[in-house]
Image: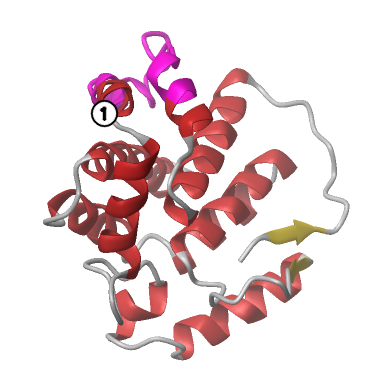
Amino acid sequence: METVAMNPAQTSLNEDAVLRIEIYNMLAHLFRQAPDQNVLTFLADIDVDTANNPQQSTMAAAWPLLKLAAEKSTPLAVEEEYQDVFIGIGRGEVVPFGSWYLTGSLMEMPLAYLRRDLKQLGFERDESVKEPEDHIAALLEVMAMLVEGGDAHLQKTFFNRHLAEWCEKFCTDVKAANSAVFYTAVGELALQFLTVEKTRFLESK
């Protein structure tokens, strides 16, 4: 699912917010589909300065792992890996939906609560996308747009309601998936980043 914000207010964003938006969107893209050669090249060349950002500095070790994984990967290999990890035959090794992690089943009450909150926030579902809205990629996309909107309370509320309880377990499962090679690095970066975000929201008033 890709969501569309209904004319979010444009705000002046600091460097931390810009970096958060970029990471949320990058992870959303990687969890939505296997990267092509352009994305792999971008990741192999990426240079993120976390030295002057205390909240992001804990991620410093994860970036070189992702860069190396991108350098060593090919589009075909990563496409096959994505298929095995997230799709499989009937089901992949990791099920990237919030309802699954929260209830053990798809299309359960967490999805209904999410749909209610998305409607209240003014987000609309793209009808061309078939996956339920609680796909990890869709939730990360929403977080990116909320950070762009600049309302810290909305960010905290959405994250705590729809990501906090299961995102770390999901990332750990991605890292541990038997078929994961490139996605081991993606899972590590996602785990570090989302842990930083979870701590951010726990510490915020």
Magenta stretch in the rendered image? 41-65
Q: Is residue 56 visible?
A: yes
Disc 1: which residue: 69
State the SS at label 1. Answer: helix
- Relative to 5, is 89 on the left or the right? left
Q: Relative to the observer, which residue lies in front, 40 or 59?
A: 40
Q: Is residue 138 above or below residue 183?
A: below
**Residue 189 sits in quarter:** top left
Find out whether residue 93 is within the magenta segment. Answer: no
Residue at 48 percent of width and 38 percent of height: 36
Find out whether residue 54 is within the magenta segment. Answer: yes
> How does the figure colour the protein chain or chains?
secondary structure
Residue at 43 percent of width and 12 percent of height: 47
Residue at 44 percent of width and 17 percent of height: 46
Mark 1 crowd level (few <14, some 14–19, many ≥20, 10 Å Cα): many
Q: Is residue 205 visible?
A: no
Residue at 39 percent of width and 38 percent of height: 75
Residue 118: percent from left, percent from top: 67, 71
- Relative to 171, is 196 on the left or the right? right
